[in-house]
Amino acid sequence: MQPESSKMGLWGAVSLAVGTMIGASIFSIFGLGARLAGQNLPWVFLVSGGLALLVAYSYAMLGRRIISDAGPVEFILKAFGDGTVTGALSFLFWLSYVISIALFANGFAGYLVPLLHLPQDGLAKSLTEVLVVLAFMALGLLGSSSVGRAEAIIVMVKLGILGIFVVLGLHTVEPTRLAPVVTGEAISGSFSAVSVFFLSYMGFGLVTNASEHMTDAARNVPRAIYLSILVVSIVYVLVSAVAVGNLSVAELIRAQDNALAVAAQPFLGHTGFLLISIGALFSIASALNATLYGGANVAFALARDGELPRVFERKLWFGSNLGLYLTAALGMTFAVSFDLGNIASLTSSVFMGLYLFVFASHWRLRHEYGGSGVVIIAGIVSVAAVFIGLMAHQWETSRAGFFTVCGVFLGSLLVEWVYRSRTGRQFVERELGEVETELAKWEREVTSLGKNLRSAATHRKHQR
């Protein structure tokens, strides 16, 4: 059992989730958001946050009792047992972390290399991607508490930068640009935007992937999940309101990936570009740090429980597990070797599928673990609608990405079936939280018994 002093506290876990959610997307999505939702963008983020809370409800109710770094995979295993689908989802879950690491490394290099006036293609970019992953892998070797403290610092810096953007930008906002538009076209576009931007909140699940390394996980897991969504919702709504309130929809669409930097010009001028670039670097760094830590935990937990090959749980080098090194190595390989455009959507699709399975798991376990059936059903209907909307948007914008997602899902089922047939390995259910609770109970009883024995011995001594 990990010593309490080396575990991550509540705010470390909150920082981990916030760091993942407020990543590169906050600096690059406003062009797309304006094209889809127009001036309804702040309301889209508000609705998306509400949908995230529906999913978070099931994560929190199950995560407070099922303490495992495997997170949602452990929930699904508990509800449906071992099987090919559970195994395929677990592999895809870990793979989505690897792809996310590659995307964050790529995004970090995309901001840093131009800022340093280096060539944007070739060695400089690839070397930056490798070095930033290696830097956070080294941080991961220092343990959970170090990762949590570093994440808290980075998150505070980037929230400070976004805070400057909001505070200064509110003075130049034109209120008429924030009024909701309720025409049929605007509502349809806003729904499409919700399908895309709902996924900006998916990082809250990382809390469950660090639960074995948290102090008082049964209490802090739900609190960290809800607090992280609250913080991110406030940031997204305020930042989008300032962006939409300072620029017209047409200007935001023209700005594309630099929309936030362009929105800062009315009140920050050229300094805004530098400020937003620095903020983007801190945001991507924190997202990379949190994702690498979560991916390594998932790799170790799944190997320990019988899904990934046992090599992932071997202890090597500085006492760390090989899952950290392999997750980092594959992330770097994806970053420098592949065109990430067609596989970026895979992470979103995997998480949407996992959310639906988590809802189904919560429904089956609600009498044992608690939970409102009405909330669970509302979550299933809402997320299913968003998932359909996401796939429809993908079909319209990237057929190659759509078929890649379908192919990977089917391929993972085939690989899982072959893997199980050849190795005979199965999942082993582990509820570390229940084990720790039982151990703590026995420890208290033994301590109490010792005190009673000492008290009885002292009493007899006095009687003599």
Image (tube, grey):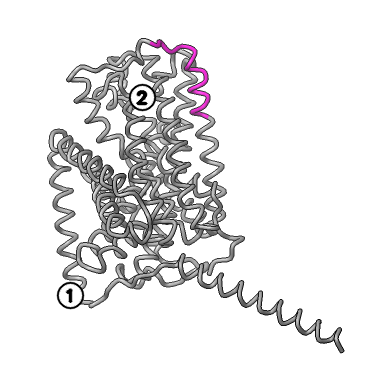
Upstream in sequence: badge 1 or badge 2: 2
Label 2 SS: helix
Q: Which of 280 and 222 is in front in this view?
A: 222
Q: What residue type is labelled 1?
A: Ser
Instruction: Please identify the dominant SS of the magenta region.
Output: helix
Give x and y (percent) for residue 91: 27, 60
Relative placement, left or right, of 357 versus 28 is left
Give the magenta part as a residue range. Answer: 161-175
Q: In which quarter of the image is residue 121?
A: top left
158 shown above or below 331:
above
Whether residue 332 is visible: no
Q: What residue type is labelled 2?
A: Pro
**Quadrant location of the C terminus in the rendered image:** bottom right
Location of mark 1 (residue) = 421
Relative placement, left or right, of 83 versus 142 is left
Relative placement, left or right, of 118 versus 389 is right
Location of mark 2 (residue) = 42
Label 1 SS: helix
